[in-house]
Image (cartoon, rainbow, N blue to C red):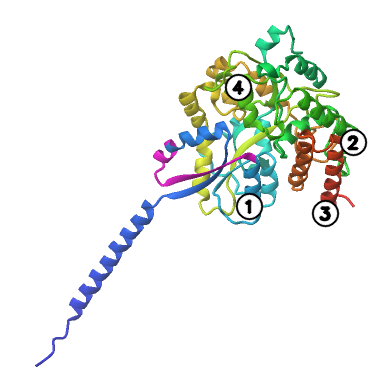
Amino acid sequence: MPTFAPSRASSSIRVRITLAAAAVSALFLSGLAQAEPVTLNIASINNPDMIELQKLAPQFEKANPDIKLRWVTMEESVLRQRLTTDIATNSGQFDLMTIGAYEAPIWAKKGWLAPMTGLPADYDEADLIKPVREGLSVDGKLYALPFYAESSMTYYRKDLFEQKKLTMPERPTWDEIAKLAAQLHDPAKGVYGICLRGRAGWGENMAIITTMANAWGGRWFDEQWQPQLSSPEWKKSVAFYVDLMRKYGPPGASSNGFNENLVLFSSGKCGMWVDATVAAGMLYHGKDSKVSDKTAFAPSPMQATDKGSHWLWIWSLAVPKSSKSQDAARKFAAWATSKEYINLVAKDSGWALVPPGTRSSTYASAEYKKVSPFSDFVLDAIQTADANTPTLKPVPYTGVQFATIPEFQSIGTVTGQAIAGALAGKTSSDAALDAAQAQAVRMMRQGRYIK
């Protein structure tokens, strides 16, 4: 029986059918791939403004269904340690990092951050307050977008001042603050004279302590990069700090950072508090504040000088070079630091609680000025905090409450731990500084700054 041989035409038809099926299959698989959203891993800090961002972020996801957000929230010191390890080892665990004014220029110069280029036209980069924009830039190029910025200021209970017939000086010195703390201190009634950061960390207790050392005329390093922690200025300021906190601070102060002191002051337990300007909105309008109508403010205290007596800090969002989703990460960072987001927070929580310190338009807003009696004061504090000439004597570094060199993170941490130990009564303030000085000298030698 003869066998049937298929014609060329029928073979051609089968080939076309097979190719068509393959094309349909490819399109289907492509559609599945497109339907799978990009997941951004975001490292965040557990402070109120970032918690608000997480609350409102689903609105971004709704408008951008191709992007999903996964938050990893940490306490400040843990965040810094984990992010430094992650970015230095290029492990790529995070697509977006919450970093500060210290890390941004250092990491950008090392090539660890993706530049914030190609921002939306309506982002309005020129609206960013100049010291804030410059603090996150290298060679004129932004490497992080500012979420909020802050300086430091003195908060005090005007009702307690009135009761005790006390007057806050227009520009208080630390000596004057100590005298006021002594008169306000009434632990039997649950009120402590003053609350200051005591938790160890270069960005925790060392933020306030460095501005105190600056106010006494101190500096981290001299012009030849020699550590100055055993200098008279540092020893006077730290001895003052330890004595002040032991006499008139809350118990367990060596465990208190920004968040703990915010709770203490807002619940009425502190007569005074020197800390970040970002707390102003929370104290005046936060739903948990019991002192919203009892709070007044003054500049951060000075002493021998006002040079470097108030700090400059910027919490920002940065995209590590190791991220495989840089465009999506940059898109979310731009949204979270935009005028649109500020207006969204204003609608959700009120103008007084918008992320402060980043945009000129916020401080020009009539709505913001109306509910924020502190707005012009805070803007001036941010604009006058001089990171380029931060101390009375000349220094080779930039940064008010930190020095922008890689070694500072370790030096500041060691110093913070030593001083926290002195505050807890484990050693004297002089011994703590002598130990920190020895460690700082060793680290600066290892870094080849000094011989």
Give the amino acid at mark 4: Ser
Q: Is residue 74 magenta?
A: yes
Which of the marked residues, 3 or 4, is nearer the chain's N terminus? Answer: 4
Residue designated by label 3: 446
Q: Which residue is mark 1?
A: 87
Q: Marks 4 and 2, Cα distance to the nearest angstrom? A: 36 Å
Q: CA distance from mark 2 to mark 3?
A: 22 Å
Q: Nearer the viewer, residue 401 or 208?
A: 208
- Disc 1 is placed on an element classified as helix
Q: Is residue 148 above or below residue 115?
A: above
Is residue 291 shown above or below 323? above
Q: Residue at x 83, y 41 (%)?
A: 396
Q: Label 2: which residue?
A: 231
Q: Residue furthest bottom?
A: 1
Q: Residue at x 81, y 27 (%)?
A: 243
The residue identified by callout 4 is 266
